């Protein structure tokens, strides 16, 4: 897994490439927390290049969404493939996260 | 591939000792691997020294105790070395610490053991002792038979999860019903079972191992994951989709197993889980 973080105006866009799993979740979590500490408040996680997220990766997303909410920030997810969407639906995390169909839609909604 | 030239006598501490046991090293000759290994070997009890590969008879003791193979960096495929050292000489891979893929490749190509580089002298000492006393060290061991059965033993380290999982998936993909939806089920469920075994069963204790047995049958996949932990009561794990649990950042692994597989069975202790996925009519 690799990820990039860029700022589009006031939105922090996190692009996740590959698999977000127990082996690498910590790195992503820390990078996003750093941005939150720096004052970033609107986050978009783009999973267009993400092939898989395991339960530990889901856990990190839940934990980050909580931290972002605590700072009155906003988080949207976009670019989930069919398998990942199934994963969010099975775990009912689709009720917890705001999920957009595409990155451009999410940017408009944040 | 270039092999190392013989070390001049007396260049290595302990090399002058007649008691030093011979080992061989295949390396590209760069990055100080030889120097580091040589220095660490001299401090072993009993000490060892590197002798040139293939020197054989004129070295007095014909058979090296171990053959070290430098697989760091842009090394050749591990597969060719079993033949080069001949039967009966254990192969030890020297690998970069984060190169679990290469480790799996080496172990499935007949390597008996491994060390990560930069070299940890204490690890080398344990390995040395283990080999002299005839004990195999825990490692990832693979047995594959006719593409339908796979056995692995993994160290309790998250770095091995991905290559181990990939092996299971590669075996599953030989079945005709291993299309995207089923491959996703196997990937997710086996991944969660392995993660649970390493993180919660064995608590990442390096002395504990995880065993994986996978059987690929024409209409059924059966994967058993066993850890060396104390087990747990799977019935006591709450449903993570409950309204009061959905905000929790953990506790979804077991739920995913049960949701994605046709059958999930734990042993009485709770340190072994068997996952079964069956082919449905029309599955691709």
Image (tube, rainbow, N blue to C red):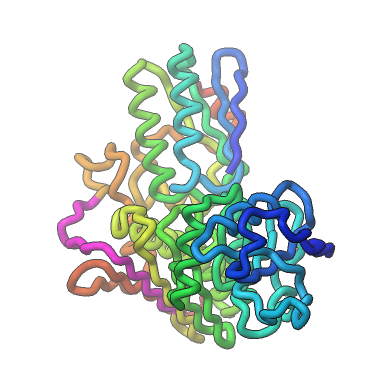
Q: Residue furthest right?
A: B2
Q: Is residue B70 above or below residue A68?
A: below
| Residue B132 visible to the viewer | yes
Comparing B120 with B281, the one in front is B120
Q: Is residue B20 above or below residue A103?
A: below
State yes or no: residue B71 in magenta: no
Q: Quadrant of the N terminus of chain A?
A: top right
Q: Residue at x 36, y 53 (%)?
A: B204
- Residue range corresponding to the magenta coloring: B221-239
Q: Is residue A87 above or below residue B78?
A: above
Q: Position of residue B91 (x, y in %)?
A: 62, 72
Q: Residue at x 29, y 70 (%)?
A: B272
Q: Position of residue A91 (x, y in %)?
A: 34, 49
How many marks overall? 0
Q: Is residue B98 above or below residue B25?
A: above
Comparing B35 with B86, the one in front is B35
Q: Position of residue A79 (x, y in %)?
A: 57, 40
Q: Position of residue B194 (x, y in %)?
A: 40, 61
Q: Residue at x 33, y 28 (%)?
A: A66
Comparing B278 with B40, the one in front is B40
Q: Is residue B202 left or right of residue A82?
A: left
Q: Quadrant of residue B210?
A: bottom left
Q: Quadrant of residue B198?
A: bottom left
């Amino acid at each position: 897994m690799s990820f990039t973080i860029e700022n589009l105006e006031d939105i922090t866009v996190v692009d996740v490439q590959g698999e977000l799993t127990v082996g690498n979740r910590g790195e992503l979590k820390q990078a996003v927390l750093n941005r939150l500490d720096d004052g970033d408040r609107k986050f978009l996680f783009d999973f267009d290049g993400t092939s898989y997220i395991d339960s530990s990766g889901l856990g990190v997303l839940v934990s980050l969404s909580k931290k972002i909410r605590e700072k009155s920030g906003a988080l949207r997810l976009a670019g989930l493939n069919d398998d990942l969407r199934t994963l969010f639906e099975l775990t009912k995390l689709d009720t917890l996260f705001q999920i957009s169909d595409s990155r451009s839609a999410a940017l408009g909604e944040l | 591939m270039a092999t190392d030239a013989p070390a001049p006598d007396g260049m290595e501490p302990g090399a002058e000792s007649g008691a030093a046991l011979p080992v061989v090293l295949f390396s590209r000759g760069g990055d100080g691997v030889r120097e580091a290994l040589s220095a660490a070997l001299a401090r072993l009890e009993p000490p060892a020294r590197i002798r040139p590969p293939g020197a054989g008879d004129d070295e007095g003791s014909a058979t090296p105790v171990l053959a070290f193979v430098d697989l760091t960096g842009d090394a050749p495929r591990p597969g060719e070395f079993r033949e080069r050292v001949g039967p009966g000489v254990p192969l030890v891979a020297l690998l970069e610490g984060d190169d679990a893929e290469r480790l799996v490749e080496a172990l499935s190509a007949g390597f008996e053991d491994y060390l990560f580089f930069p070299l940890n002298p204490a690890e080398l000492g344990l390995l040395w002792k283990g080999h002299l006393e005839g004990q195999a060290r825990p490692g990832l061991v693979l047995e594959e038979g006719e593409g339908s059965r796979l056995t692995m033993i993994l160290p309790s380290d998250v770095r091995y999860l991905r290559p181990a999982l990939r092996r299971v998936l590669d075996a599953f993909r030989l079945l005709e019903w291993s299309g995207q939806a089923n491959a996703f089920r196997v990937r997710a469920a086996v991944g969660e079972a392995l993660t649970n075994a390493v993180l919660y069963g064995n608590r990442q204790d390096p002395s504990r191992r995880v065993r994986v047995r996978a059987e690929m049958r024409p209409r059924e996949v059966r994967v058993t994951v066993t850890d060396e932990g104390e087990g747990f009561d799977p019935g006591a794990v709450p449903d993570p989709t409950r309204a009061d649990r959905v905000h929790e950042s953990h506790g979804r692994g077991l739920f995913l197993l049960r949701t994605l597989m046709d059958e999930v069975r734990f042993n009485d202790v709770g340190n072994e889980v068997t996952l079964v996925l069956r082919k449905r009519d029309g599955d691709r």
